[in-house]
Amino acid sequence: MTDTFEALRLNPLLLQALKDEGYKAPTPIQAQAIPAVMEGRDLLGIAQTGTGKTAAFALPLLHKLALLKGRPPRGGCRVLVLSPTRELATQIAESFRTYGKHLGFSIATIFGGVGFGGQRQALGRGIDVLVATPGRLQDHLEQGSARLDHVSALVLDEADEMLSMGFQSELEEIFKQTKDRKSTWLFSATFQ
Ligand code: AMP
């Protein structure tokens, strides 16, 4: 297992951000997941909050985004992370901002309980990393303010929670609409 971030061959601007945060070494899930993701493999992770799982997907995703050319399409995003709650979505987006602070990507959240206007505006500009709850994302898809045909990586965080909250049909629709994705990662606290 890899015991330094340098050995994971992450973008130097990510290594700088990790240094700024005072992270000394990858956690076990990071050491296992990051190399797999860098190779473009799909991933199923059984991990609870507190294990460092957010960085396990955020770091390699940001690394890969930095290799892409061009801009995200209007209404669309390049990386889509689904989360069961607005609190977790906010936290995940915050982590992407922290780790990606030297890279300058656009990162936005979409969740229910707030107005549509700001979310529509953000989508309209095109987003590099979108963190969304399935219900509100589905609303945007139905209204035509979001499109998912340019998503290259899809992450389901706390997939078990999303299913037990009844988001199965939304997840199926999102899977269908992200048919061009190159990788899919699923994190769950339990696996049944
Ligand atoms: P998570 O499991 O993703 O919710 O992360 C739990 C906490 O661990 C967060 O506060 C992270 O900032 C922190 N963290 C993640 N990876 C590392 C690391 N390699 N070294 C130190 N702290 C970390």
Image (cartoon, rainbow, N blue to C red):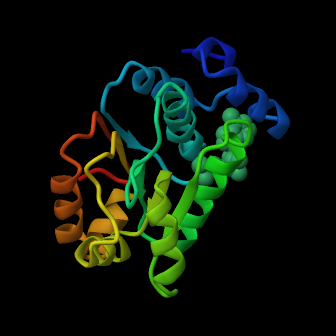
Compare residues 19 and 142 and report the one nearer the observer: 142
Give residue 112's quadrant in the image.
Answer: bottom left
Q: Is residue 174 visible?
A: yes
Q: Is residue 4 visible?
A: no
169 relative to 100 in the view: left or right: left
Q: Is residue 17 above or below residue 8?
A: below
174 relative to 4 in the view: left or right: left
User: Taking the image as four quarters, which one is ligand 1 found in?
Assistant: top right
Q: How many marks?
A: 0
Compare residues 7 and 32 and report the one nearer the observer: 7
- Identified at 33% across, 69% down, the residue is 134
Q: Is residue 187 above or below residue 93?
A: above
- Identified at 48% across, 29% down, the residue is 64
- Identified at 33% across, 66% down, the residue is 146
Residue 66, image x and y in percent? Answer: 55, 29
Residue 179, image x and y in percent? Answer: 18, 45
63 relative to 70 in the view: left or right: right
Residue 122, image x and y in percent? Answer: 52, 66
Compare residues 94 and 85 and report the one nearer the observer: 94
- Identified at 66% across, 57% down, the residue is 94
Residue 155, image x and y in percent? Answer: 38, 48
Quadrant including the N terminus: top right
